[in-house]
Image (cartoon, coloured by chain):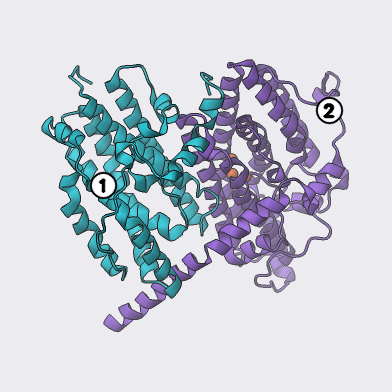
Amino acid sequence: MTQQMTSPEHIEYVLRLGDNALILGQRLSEWCGHAPVLEEDMALANMSLDLIGQARMLLTHAGRLEGRGRDEDQLAFLRTEPNYRNLTLCELPNQDFARTMVRNFLYSSFQKLLWERLMTSSDAELAAIAAKSIKEARYHAQHAGDWVIRLGDGTAESHARAQGALDYLWPYTAEFFAATPVDDTVAAAGVGPAWSELETAWEALVLPVLAEATLTVPARTPFRSYGKFGRHSEHMGHLLAEMQIMQRTYPGAQW
Amino acid sequence: MYTQALDIPQQNTEAKGPRTIENPAYQAEFDAKIDAGGYIEAKDWMPESYRKTLVRQISQHAHSEIVGMLPEGNWITRAPTLKRKAILLAKVQDEGGHGLYLYAAAETLGVSRDELLDALHSGRAKYSSIFNYPTLTWADIGVVGWLVDGAAIMNQIPLCKCSYGPYARAMVRICKEESFHQRQGYDLLLTMMKGTQEQRDMVQDAVNRWWWPSIMMFGPHDKDSTHSAQSARWGIKRISNDDLRQKFVDATVEQAKVLGVTMPDPELKWNEARGHYDFGAIDWDEFWNVVNGHGQGNVDRLAARVKAWDDGAWVREAALEYARKHDARDSQAA
Ligand SMILES: [Fe+2]
Ligand SMILES: [Fe+2]
Ligand SMILES: [Fe+2]
């Protein structure tokens, strides 16, 4: 990586990407051994692995940009809750297979657009991470999209569960596109797009699939969530307590 | 991860499948092929007892792989570093893959995966008892890789040359991955042993809990083992339980020295005359108690599998219903 002036906004932007991958990867890993069929155990573990892999690259990169000697594990395990910048959607409990798949679909469709744009980032390291991650996001969106269609257009029960999942998750997607000064700075430096720019393209990706799944897209409401600003849901503290336990219990130990 | 078939006297036949018409001419041809060390393939004639023994052994092995995902899955969300989390996830994913290859191999013998799973869920089928032991600390993840995957490899390498082609080929792939798991487990422990005293104590404690169950994985002593002679002739059990166990002990004790841990067996010592390590008496009451359902984890492990299956029923139904609707629509459109 070249010596470049790194702004705090740039670091936060990369951390946000890393935290999304980390926290959703953590959630998906909870499925391992408990999925509806063995093939989905494998697929969910595989997607979790992809996300943990992305998180490792992104957090390592964020740590280097920051220049305070923090590595991927210090960033992953030793921050306090308000310092995690992931979307609230990523930290919500899995609930059931419908909610897990609808979330994966909404999130990975967004991620696909984001990685496409980041492939031309002025941050060469970030561009390289994007080039690798785009393939994973495409696969995740395809896999989850296929399930959203099958569940939505399957049985009465699966339809009701998929619709319930969409009703629950949809309000959290407003956070994807919420404007933030961080994005403006980062966009001006050519590091990456302001996420608010992606809303139209995202809707063009997800709405046809939701229609094919015979699901009704809820109207936007005043509900807002603020995970990417550091204010999380009640679920986040429990996720972190579990994820951080070893590093918190044995400070400084090597594993 | 593990298994060789355990012959349990009270065990029911796990899954039915088609019956074979017995035929002396075919039998002679089959015997000749076995004696020449050839492979039996799915389409070949085989005696009913051969087919049933294989279905039992392969399905027990498959069940062991998927139940084995649970004790290790127990630590995925708490792995201490991202690198270790990724390694563990990949490992548990491999075990699921082993389950898939093995169910597929069993299906070539005319039973369905659903029938086999039903036998597991209803408690008629067995899986390796080792997975009824709890994983209490992070060191258990290393010790399971080192000892449990290690014992599995000892058991399974001979099966790579077993007489049933689909099973032998599945075992070749599985053994490669199991030896990778064992090295990763050992590497995890080496790292912990270079750490703090608290970490070293954690490793020793895990070794104390897993050593005896690991050497029990080779099954009863040869003198107490049923069916072994027939299985040996068929090439689906090529080396005896006691020989495999000895081989495992000899290899593992040396690895323990490098690691800096001791096995919880005061009678464990090198016997110059035999050229092997002697070891203490195995507590077979403990072994049979766990086999017969009274281990710490038996109830919870099976309940977790049954819950995953039952909770997933609506998903599987939805997939079938979607396919049915779309086949109907596609054929209307055609
Ligand atoms: Fe393994
Ligand atoms: Fe395995
Ligand atoms: Fe195995």
Picture quadrant of residue A221: bottom left
Q: Which residue lies furthest to the bottom in this view?
A: B332
Picture quadrant of residue A208: bottom left
Question: Which of the two residues, B57 or A240, is positioned nearer the viewer here?
Answer: A240
Say whether residue A146 is visible: yes
Q: In this view, does A49 lie above or below B108?
A: above
Question: Ligand 1 shows up in which quadrant of the image?
Answer: top right
Picture quadrant of residue A51: top left
Say whether residue A54 is visible: no
Point 39% across, 64% down: residue: A164
Helix, strand or loop for disc 2: loop
Point 54% across, 31% down: residue: A245
Q: Mark 1 lies on which chain?
A: A
Return the residue at label 2.
B279
Chain letter, purple in picture = B
Residue B277 location (% of width, % of height): 80, 24
Q: Is residue A218 above or below residue A50?
A: below
Point 13% across, 32% down: residue: A190
Colour representing chain A = cyan
